[in-house]
Image (cartoon, helix red, strand yellow):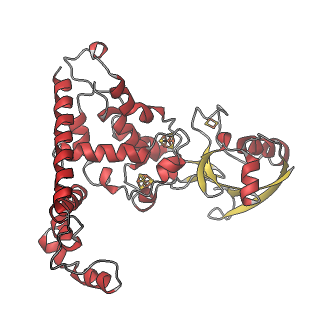
């Protein structure tokens, strides 16, 4: 079956080197053929100038991540015919949020720098023999998904927060952070959480979910980020806007059973900064985006809400004590 491949081309050495353009190729594809096989066919039979990265062809090495019909994917792990059926063509562009070097080849330097910054290896306490630490099934489950990462960068390519903040630690490095913070043998969890609670860390995520949706290895970076946030708050790293916002939200629901946006803003931003937000708040109210100030805000059945909180708190205390006991052992 003839399939149309549209590929975004870019050559930094061309006379007009700022320009990228789409180039179309028709190739013969059969059932089970991958996008990478299509690209290889093009580069071997139709156009030897086409540049892309690949190695294992088996979704192991992480080199062939690119944007395929608008989504970050591994070319070796994506079949052509289902794409053709859904979109009528195969459109390939370089991975987003990365500098393009040539055609589909992107610069991964920033990706590796972000990983390097989070100290991507276990740092157990000096006096602990890691081979003697008992690891339960639950301990393994907690970090199992995060260990599956193949460093392909698909998640960073799809990340909305990284698009607006180039300094954001980003999902791949955050998933890797959880792999160590969640490891019972780690000795620097608290230091890691403190660093991750600073600007461009866990609280910069806007929870769009793309990283989890597009990760070819089901690492679930967003779940890792949520666990890091939870652990950071539990460990007392709350002097930042993200943690203050979460605490204000929790507080509001515990007290009145619903969100009190105005009170939450004051608790998150502080009094002085909140004053500057009043015009925006009024505008939002006018457009029905925010409820007005509530005179009798408490919901019926608030006692039930309080009971849920009480039970949850007891669970959390139990979890924390068990973790601390394990760390001491
Ligand atoms: S959920 Fe967060 S980390 Fe994941 S892609 Fe969205 S903004 Fe980025
Ligand atoms: S978390 Fe998933 S998408 Fe991100 S680098 Fe690792 S394997 Fe790739
Ligand atoms: S070529 Fe190795 S992951 Fe695709």
Q: Is residue 205 left or right of residue 310?
A: right
Q: Is residue 238 visible?
A: no
In this picture, is 26 found above or below 327?
Answer: below
Residue 153 placement, left or right of 304: right
Residue 207 vs residue 285, the one in the foreground: 285
293 lies above or below 41? below
Left or right: where 68 falls relative to 40: left
The image position of residue 266, as x and y in percent, is: 16, 70
Residue 245 at x, y percent in the picture: 23, 61
Residue, x 21% and y 51% (percent of image)? 308
Between 284 and 122, which is closer to the camera in this rendering?
284
Q: Residue at x 25, y 49 (%)?
A: 197
Quadrant, the C terminus: top left
Q: Which quadrant of the figure has residue 11?
A: bottom right
Q: Residue furthest left?
A: 271
Image-based side of 112 in relation to 92, left or right: left
Residue 207: % across, % down: 39, 56
Q: In front here: 312 or 285?
A: 312
> Can you tell which quarter of the image residue 321 is in?
top left
Q: Is residue 34 above or below residue 83?
A: above
In this rendering, the count of numbered labels is: 0
Can residue 36 be seen here? The reply is yes
Question: What residue lies at 54% left-to-right and 48% top-to-bottom?
Answer: 214
Q: Picture coordinates of residue 24 (x, y %)?
A: 79, 59
């Amino acid at each position: 079956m003839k399939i149309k491949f549209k590929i975004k081309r870019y050559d930094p050495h061309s006379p007009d080197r700022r320009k990228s353009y789409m180039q179309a190729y028709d190739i013969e594809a059969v059932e089970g053929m991958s996008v990478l096989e299509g690209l290889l066919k093009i580069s071997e039979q139709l156009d030897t100038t086409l540049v892309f990265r690949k190695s294992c062809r088996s979704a192991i090495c992480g080199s062939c991540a690119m944007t395929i019909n608008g989504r970050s994917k591994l070319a070796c792990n994506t079949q052509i015919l289902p794409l053709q059926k859904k979109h009528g063509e195969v459109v390939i562009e370089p991975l987003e949020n990365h500098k393009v070097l040539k055609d589909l080849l992107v610069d991964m330097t920033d990706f590796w720098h972000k990983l390097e910054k989070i100290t991507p290896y276990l740092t157990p306490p000096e006096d602990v023999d890691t081979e003697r630490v008992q690891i339960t099934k639950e301990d393994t489950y907690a970090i199992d998904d995060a260990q599956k990462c193949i460093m392909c960068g698909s998640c960073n390519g799809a990340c909305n927060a990284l698009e607006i903040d180039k300094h954001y630690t980003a999902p791949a490095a955050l998933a890797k952070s959880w792999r160590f913070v969640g490891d019972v043998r780690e000795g620097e969890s608290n230091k890691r959480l403190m660093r991750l609670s600073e600007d461009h860390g866990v609280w910069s995520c806007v929870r769009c979910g793309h990283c989890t949706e597009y990760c070819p290895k089901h690492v679930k970076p967003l779940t890792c980020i949520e666990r890091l946030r939870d652990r950071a708050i539990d460990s007392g790293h709350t002097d930042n806007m993200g943690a203050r916002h979460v605490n204000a939200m929790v507080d509001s629901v515990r007290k009145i059973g619903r969100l009190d946006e105005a009170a939450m803003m004051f608790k998150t931003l502080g009094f002085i900064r909140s004053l500057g937000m009043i015009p925006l708040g009024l505008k939002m109210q006018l457009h029905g985006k925010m409820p007005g100030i509530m005179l009798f805000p408490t919901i019926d059945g608030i006692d039930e809400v309080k009971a849920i909180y009480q039970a949850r708190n007891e669970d959390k205390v139990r979890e924390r004590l068990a973790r601390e006991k394990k760390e001491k052992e």
